[in-house]
Amino acid sequence: MIYRNTVIISVILSFCFYLCSTTTVKVWGFSSQSTTKLEHQAHDLYNDGKYLQSLSLAKEALQLHPNDPWLLTNIGSTLNELSNFTGAISFYKHALSIDPHHIGGLVGIGSVFEKLGNHSAAMIYYKEALKQPTADNIELLEKAHAFAHLGNYSQAIDIVNQILKQNATNIDALEIKGVSLL
């Protein structure tokens, strides 16, 4: 019985580590002042894994709001999912040129470096993201994402629990919590 439980736990942990290494927590932020219907449609397509359609709508929205750091970060995240790392970094850096403390841009660049296997560079960006103040749940999610990637799972869980108290069905917070509990 003990052996069977050990094997089951081992299989579950192996699967969890596989998920952690192949899953990117997807956080899509909105600027409270300029959110458009196009951005919401792009967000829905992004969450459905329809990255090319999402990218098309997000770029259309960018024509309306060319200096929105969240929109730039969202396009970077979409390009990141499409493995267009150069393009992703370009959009993240553009967001950071508008707002040098933009937490989404910092976490995004960290994510690209992590995917490319440059963990030391990724850690620099995640640590910088943790220094930034948070004004809303999207920024808290970005901070939780950074904590999780740095291996500070208890701090990531503390943050997402704050969000889940307000909205128990926040899929992004649940995903980060699930990855952190593994």
Image (cartoon, rainbow, N blue to C red):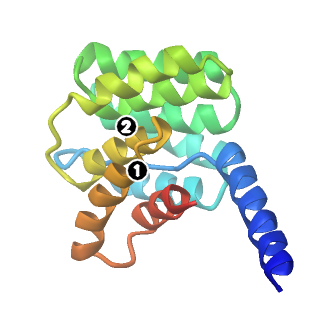
44 in relation to 94, above or below: below
Spot occupied by residue 79 in the image (x, y as percentages of width and height): 60, 32
Under tag 1, what secondary structure? helix
Q: Which of disc 1 and disc 2 is earlier in sequence?
A: 1
Q: Amino acid at mark 1?
A: Glu
Near-viewer residue (19 or 8):
8
Left or right, residue 92 beside residue 95:
right
27 in relation to 162, above or below: above
For image coordinates 85% across by 76% down, the residue present is 3
Spot occupied by residue 65 in the image (x, y as percentages of width and height): 30, 33
For image coordinates 53% across by 49% down, the residue present is 25
Spot occupied by residue 51 in the image (x, y as percentages of width and height): 65, 46
Circle 1 residue: 39
Residue 71: mark: 2
Quadrant for the N terminus in the image? bottom right
Q: For residue 65, say whether it is visible.
A: no
Q: Amino acid at mark 2?
A: Leu
Q: For residue 48, say whether it is visible.
A: yes
> Which image quadrant for residue 67?
top left
Q: Are marks 2 and 1 in contact (CB under 8 Å)?
A: yes
